[in-house]
Amino acid sequence: MAISSSNFNTVVYLSDVNTQCRLFKRSFEQLEIAAEHWINISNGIDDGTKFSPLNIISECTVCLSSMSAIKRMLNAEKPPKALQRSLTLFELLGKPSLDNVFSKSVRNSWEHHDERLDRVLRDYKAGVGVSEIFVAANCPKEGTLILKRFNPNDMSIHFLDNVVELTLCLEEINQLILAIDATIKGLHR
């Protein structure tokens, strides 16, 4: 069905947000499989699934990137044109609750990891272990500096001391998808 010229831009923006939501969900589903595998491994069960820590961190990065793109589209802070666009789209969607998706803590840590490492390394003490990627159902050793971590028990992503709980983000993304679908359907009338 053709989109009227008055709604065309809005539908395009919402379609782009919808794509980011679906990318998040796809990676979340992969992380669920990976989480089950790593929990099985911790229980001494080899289920034959293969999810390396690097693959897991890759899927985590897709989740964080998608949330960042959604935030830029629906909660822009500047420039003025982007701010107006995001306010209009967010209002049109019924102002869905996206507190977790809009959270900056870990996404900023991952996107600006060099600055974060500069800060951490100023206080670095000799003798501290370092793990660039940590994926396990068990907690890391105390005294180890963990740069990037996926916790399969609660589906959370960690960068140093910041945490994003992906299950909470998924709940918000599912509601956002429903709002997008309803809004786009309404714009086609």
Image: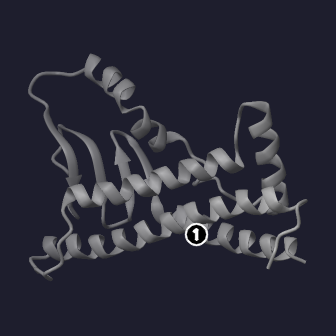
Q: Is residue 57 above or below residue 146?
A: below
Position of the C terminus, as image quadrant, is bottom right
SS state under label 1:
helix
Crowd around label 1: few <14 · some 14–19 · many ≥20 (10 Å): some
> Residue 48's quadrant in the figure?
bottom left
Q: Residue at x 76, y 47 (%)?
A: 86
Residue bearing mark 1: 171
Q: Residue at x 10, y 80 (%)?
A: 46
Q: Is residue 173 left or right of residue 11?
A: left
Q: Position of residue 88 (x, y in %)?
A: 84, 50
Q: Position of residue 58 (x, y in %)?
A: 32, 55
Position of the N terminus, as image quadrant, is bottom right
| Residue 135 visible in the current orientation | no
Q: Is residue 103 above or below residue 155?
A: above
Q: Is residue 21 above or below residue 125?
A: below
| Residue 176 visible in the current orientation | yes
Q: Position of residue 83 (x, y in %)?
A: 77, 38
> Residue 159's quadrant in the figure?
top left
**Considering depth in this image, is 40 or 31 the residue closer to the camera?**
31
- Residue type at tag 1: Glu
Q: Position of residue 163 (x, y in %)?
A: 42, 48
